[in-house]
Amino acid sequence: MGGFLYRGLRMMLAKAAGSYTETAIDDEIVVMSLASGDFFSLTGSARAIWLRIDGTNDRDRLVADLAAEYGLAAETIGADVDEFIAQLRGAGLLAPA
């Protein structure tokens, strides 16, 4: 599984250094894949997830933090977070395991 670094038994999410460039514009983060040239506009919860992918958070911690921030149950947002992480992985923006 790409996008995870192992720390103990937890898999930490990390960005793939050197595979993208990013810039913040107001409440948006624009990420460009250096491999494909594709641009990704991250706002709202996508922005919040991207900012938390720093090599110190695993998927469960990320979901718990977002659930608390948005006042939702972790079970409610878990599948959406997994889908977004899969999209980042597919775009080559997450570090390999």
Image (tube, grey):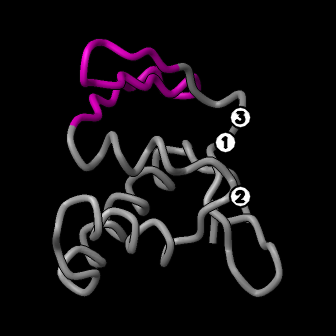
Label 2 packing within 10 angstroms: few (<14), some (14-19), many (20+): some
User: Is residue 11 shown above or below 48?
Assistant: below
Q: Which mark is residue 17?
A: 3
Q: Is residue 82 magenta?
A: no
Towards the viewer: 51 or 2: 51
Q: Position of residue 17 (x, y in %)?
A: 71, 34
Q: Quadrant of residue 1?
A: bottom right
Towards the viewer: 71 or 47: 71
Tell me what residue is drawn at x 38 percent, y 16 percent: 24
Tell me what residue is drawn at x 56 percent, y 45 percent: 92
**In terms of secondary structure, what is the magenta stretch mainly?**
strand
Find numbered disc 2 in the image and state the secondary structure of the residue it sits on: loop
Q: Position of residue 64 (x, y in %)?
A: 39, 74
User: Is residue 49 shown above or below 41?
Assistant: below
Label 1 packing within 10 angstroms: few (<14), some (14-19), many (20+): some
Q: Amino acid at mark 3?
A: Ala
Q: Amino acid at mark 1?
A: Ala
Tell me what residue is drawn at x 33 percent, y 40 percent: 47
Which residue is label 2 attached to? 96
Tell me what residue is drawn at x 39 percent, y 65 percent: 65
Which of discs 3 and 2 lies nearer the camera? The answer is 3
Mark 1 in CB contact with mark 2 (< 8 angstroms): yes
Which residue is label 1 attached to? 16
Label 3 packing within 10 angstroms: few (<14), some (14-19), many (20+): few
Name the N-terminal-most of marks 1 and 2. Answer: 1
Name the N-terminal-most of marks 3 and 2. Answer: 3
Numbered range of the magenta stretch:
22-43
- Judged from this view, the residue extending furthest toward the right is 8
Mark 1 in CB contact with mark 3 (< 8 angstroms): yes
Label 3 and label 2: CA atoms lie apart by 11 Å
Would you say 73 lies left or right of 64 here? Answer: left
